[in-house]
Amino acid sequence: MPVIELQDVSKLYGFGDATTVALDEVSLRIDKGEFVAVMGPSGSGKSSLMNILGLLDRPTHGAYELDGRSVARLRANQRAKMRRNQIGFVFQSFNLLPKLNVLDNVALPLTYRGMTQTRRLKKAAAMLERVGLSDREYFMPKQLSGGQAQRVAIARALISDPSIIIADEPTGNLDSSSSRLVMELLADVHKTGNTILLVTHNPELTRYASRVVFMHDGTIIGDERSKLGDVPKLAKSLYFLPRKTIEDDLAGVSVLMQEVEKEGPKKSKKAKNSTKQKTRKYQSRTKKKGTK
């Protein structure tokens, strides 16, 4: 039985001539324990799809079943309970409460379950240890790096033991090193049996997924399975993966030379000579390439 099943789901905003079709008869089935990446350009319907899957919004038309239950038949309090207990959210902007320390941020979702403070904090401390931040329990969010803040957000998403994690551009505000750390953590969460839904613009991140869904203009235009560690063929054809060229290297050396000149005598002769050697090296490579 699938954990998520959409049948001809549409989402419309506005009325009359001002109507916007965010989702156009989308059908999707996700089995328990899958790691699914959702890709597509801005305005393709990814966020609208995630809002519906996360019970933050209702479809205008179509059917949605979560764990075999029709979402349309759930009352507001039932939807809230299911969202609280079964779905964890990780956002691009972290959404940590600035006036609460790390430990209290992670423990917050347990407050709504009527758990005592002692049990909440004990469980939150164990979750922070799981994400490698046990030494940051009493730090405030502004004292954390981007990667640390996102790991706190993941700990908060996991605190209620949800079966589904929805991660919306979780590495969008992070550098490459922090992004790798966060994705490895999500991969570890996936190994424990959680279903992961990842929204991303970065084709490289699809290496962590076992399946990639491609969206455009509110519809699914591709659905491809791939081996872990591989970028799906469709991702390669729809998105241009960055490749470093000799010209890129020369541009980088040029910027470095400008910084050296700005610093003047403070910069050592050794650094200047090293930079000049790099410049000659890349110019030589360029000439050789041009003669071939």
Image: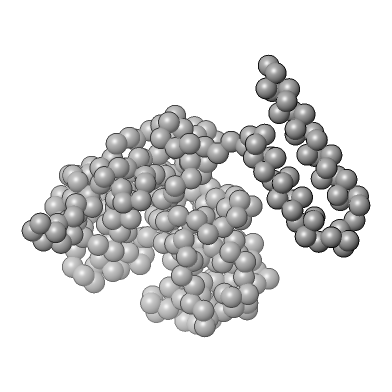
Q: Which residue is drawn at 52% across and 37% down?
A: 241
Q: Residue at x 48, y 77 (%)?
A: 97
Colour option used: one colour
On-image quarter of the C terminus: top right
Residue 222 lies in quadrant: top left
- In the rendered image, residue 289, in percent from the top left (x then y), is placed at 69, 23
Q: In the displayed structure, does residue 86 sit left or right of residue 74?
A: right
Q: In the displayed structure, does residue 1 sit left or right of residue 162?
A: left
* Picture layout, residue 212 above or below residue 97: above
* Picture layout, residue 97 above or below residue 264: below
Q: Residue at x 67, y 34 (%)?
A: 246
- In the rendered image, residue 115, in percent from the top left (x then y), is placed at 44, 78
Q: Which of 249 and 30 is in front in this view?
A: 249
Q: Which of 143 and 116 is in front in this view?
A: 143
Q: Report whether residue 231 is seen.
A: yes
Q: In the displayed structure, does residue 134 sit left or right of residue 203?
A: right
- In the rendered image, residue 66, in percent from the top left (x then y), is placed at 27, 53
Residue located farthest toward the top when viewing the structure as drawn: 292
